Amino acid sequence: MPVETSLNIAVLVSVGQHPVSGRARRADQDARAVELGLTLAGRSLSLVHVGDAGEPALRQYLGMGLRTMTVLQEAPEADAASSLLQYFATHPADIVLAGVQAERGEASGLLPYLLAERLGWPLVPRIAQIRAIENGRAEVLQALPRGQRRALTVPLPFIATVDSAAPGARQTAFGPGQRGLFDIQRGLAQADVARAEWVEAQARPRPKRLNVVKAKSAAERFKAATAKPQGQGGQVMKQESSREKAQAIFDLLVAEGVIRQ
Amino acid sequence: MSDVIRRDPRTERILRNRLHPLHESLAGGPVRGPTGLLRRNPHAVGFIGPNGLKRIDRSSTGPAPSGRDLRRSATTHSEEPALPLHRVEQPDFYVAAVLDMAGGRLTSHDRDILGQAQQLARSGGGQGAVVAIVLGEAREAGFDTAGADRLIQVTHCDGQALDDYCPERKLAVLQAVEDQLGPRFWLFPDSVHGGADLGARLAVRLGERPAVHAWQVTETETLCRGGSGRIDIRRHTPRVLLLAEECALPVDDSRHQALPIQLDEYPDVRVCIHDQGLVPVDPSQIPLAEAEFILSAGNGVRDWDQFHEVATALGATEGASRVAVDDGFMPRFRQIGATGTWVTARVYVAVGISGAVQHLQGIGRCEKVVAINLDDGCDMVRRADLGAIGDSSEILAELLALAREHRGGKDTDATVPETLEVA
Ligand SMILES: Cc1cc2nc3c(=O)[nH]c(=O)nc-3n(C[C@H](O)[C@H](O)[C@H](O)COP(=O)(O)OP(=O)(O)OC[C@H]3O[C@@H](n4cnc5c(N)ncnc54)[C@H](O)[C@@H]3O)c2cc1C
C-alpha cells in the first residue's frame, strides 16, 4: 500500500489497561489502528485523544514514530463524543480510525457510532486492512469470526473501527515518545450526566452455568453422568457404493454452506 | 383447581388397610403421601414369573412386564414432546429480540437472548409478547420451542437480499419494527456475528444509551461488565440492551406461538457500504480453534498426499488425532482433543478416527460430525450425524473427484483461486 500523503487520516486513541497487571498502556486495538494509519499516511497521520495530556501512557503512541498528538483536555467525567464532534467540525478528515472498544471504563464501543451518526458518515466496523483508496472510495477488508475476511467498498469520508485481527502494532520507542509534543486544546464537552448515577464495583466472577439434567429416574441420571457424548443417532451408510457415500458427504457440506463458490 | 394438597383421612385409612373392601379400587393410581410426594408401593413392583416367583426387571431398556409400570412409562413418553403452549393473544407490549442466526440457525447465544426476552415479557405488569426478528435466510424450524411468541422474518429489503453485509438496510427494517410495534425493550446478542454492530446502530439512531456486555438483567436494573472485564456497572435498565452470552437460561419447558408479523413499509435507506463478497482465505492459516470446517485425519488414513489434496480441494482446515501426530504425519499444533486444541467447527469430518474419549472431548462443540471409518460400531460413527463405512482412501478419492467437478463446473478458467494470507 503506497503512502498517500494527500489524505487526512485521524486516529482516535485512548489509554489502555494491561489485562493482568491493570497498568496503563497503549490500548491494543488503538495501537493497531495507529499502525494501519501509519502504513496509509506515514507521518502526516494525526492522533487525537480526549482526556488528560499528563497521562504517561499516551507517549507510547508517539513512540511509534509520530511527532505530535492532539489532546482535547477534558475532565474524566466529560462526554468525549461531544468534544470530538466539535473538533472534527473544524478539522476535517477523510478517514477516522478507532479501536473496537476501550480497555477501561464502560467500554461500550459506541463512540464511533455516535460520531458517524452525527457527522452523517458511514461506519465500517472491525476492519483488518484498507486495501486501496481510489476515486474517493476505499476498499476495506472486514474481519469476520472464524478467520474469514469480507471485502467492502465505502465512500470517503468514513469512520472505521480496527479489529484485533489487523496487523500487530510496531514497537514503541521510549526516547522519541518522550520527545513528542502534545498540541493541547481546551475541550468544551458537556459532562456525562447519565454515568454519574451508575454504581461501579470490582467485577465478580460470573456463575458457571450448570449442566442441568432433566432425568426422571435414577437410572437416567446415572446414564447422563457417565455416558459418552452421543449424537442423536445419525445416518449410517454401509451398503452403498463409495461414490454414493462421497456424494452424501459432499451434499451435507454444500447444505451446511462450508463449500463456497 | 387449587394446587393445595388436601388430606382425605378416609381414603388414607382405606389405602393403609389392604383388607378394606374398597382398597383395590382406590390403590390403583399413584398414591400421594401427606407432603404431596409420590409414594411407590414396593409390593406392587414386578410381576409373578412362570415358575411362581416374583420377578423385577430393573433395566429401563427391556420391555416393562408389569402392567402398571407399562402404563406409567407410556404416559411419560407421550407427554415429553407436547410441551405446554404459552399463548399471548392480545399483547400489552412487545420485547424485540434481534437474532444473529449465524449459519442460518439459532445459536446458543440467540437462545439465551430469547430466554431473557421471555423473562422481561413476563415481568412488570401486563402480558408481553417476544418478537424474534430474523434478518436474512434461516434454516431454523424451532422458533416455537426457543421462546418466540411472534416472528418477523425479512429476507429482502429494497429488492436486495439481507444475507450480505448491509447494516443500513437492516437498520431500516428495525426502524420499521420500531414504528409499527414500539417494543418496550430491544435485545441484541453482544456478539461478533453482527448483533453488537446492529444494536449500536439502532441505539444511536433511537437516541438511547444502550447497556453493553449486560449479563444480569431485570426489569429495573442491569449489571454490565466493563472494559477488560475488570469492573461491573450497575445501572437502570435501558430500552436497548446488548447482552453477553449466558445472560439468562434459554426457554426449554414451553412452546410458543411464533406467529408471523408482516411489516407495512420501510423507511428510505441511503446505502454507502457495498459488500464485495467474502475473500477466499487460505484455510491452513486459520487458527484451528476458530476454523469453521475441519477435515481431520487419524490412524485410518493410508494415503497422506491424497488427504492433503482433499483438504485443499474442499477448502478445509486440517486437523489430526493424537496417533496421527505421534506417528509424525501431522504437526503437533494440528492435534485435536483433550491434550490438543478444543475446536468449535460447524462441520467436522473425521477420517479414520476411532473416537477415543480424549478426542471426542475436543470436538464436543462441533455441530455436524461426519465420520469415514471401516468400523461401523466405533464411537466416532455413533457420535456422527453421517457415518460413511468404508475404506478411507476410496471415499476420499471420490470426494476429491466431486470437489474438482464442482469447482470445474462453476469457473473453468480460474484454476487456483487467489487466497489471502492471514497474519
Ligand atoms: C492422557 C491422554 C491424552 C490423550 N489426548 C488425546 C488428544 O488430545 N487427542 C487425540 O486425538 N487423542 C488423544 N489421546 C489418544 C486417544 O486415547 C486415542 O489413542 C487416539 O485418539 C486414537 O486415535 P485414532 O482414532 O486416530 O486411532 P485408532 O484408535 O487406531 O483408530 C483408527 C480408526 O481408523 C479406522 N480405520 C483403519 N483403517 C481404515 C481405513 N483404511 N479406512 C477407514 N478407516 C480405517 C479404524 O476402524 C479405527 O476406527 C490421549 C490419550 C491419553 C492417554
Image (cartoon, grey):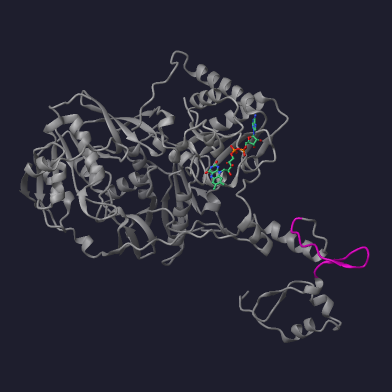
As drawn, the residue found furthest toward the right would be B51
Residue at figure coordinates x 16%, y 26% from the top left: A4
Is-magenta flag for residue B121? no
| Residue B49 drawn in magenta | yes
Picture layout, residue B89 above or below residue A170: below
- Residue farthest toward the top in the current orientation of the protein: B413
Q: Position of residue A141 (x, y in %)?
A: 31, 31
- What is the magenta range? B45-61
Is B169 left, or right, of A194 in this rendering?
A: right
Q: Is residue B221 above or below residue B368?
A: below
Q: Quadrant of residue A248?
A: top right
Q: Is residue B400 above or below residue A146?
A: above
Comparing B292 with B267, the one in front is B292
Residue A94: quarter of image? top left
**Quarter in which the N terminus of chain A is drawn:** top left
Q: Position of residue A100 (x, y in %)?
A: 28, 44
Look at the image and tell me whether residue A85 can be seen.
no
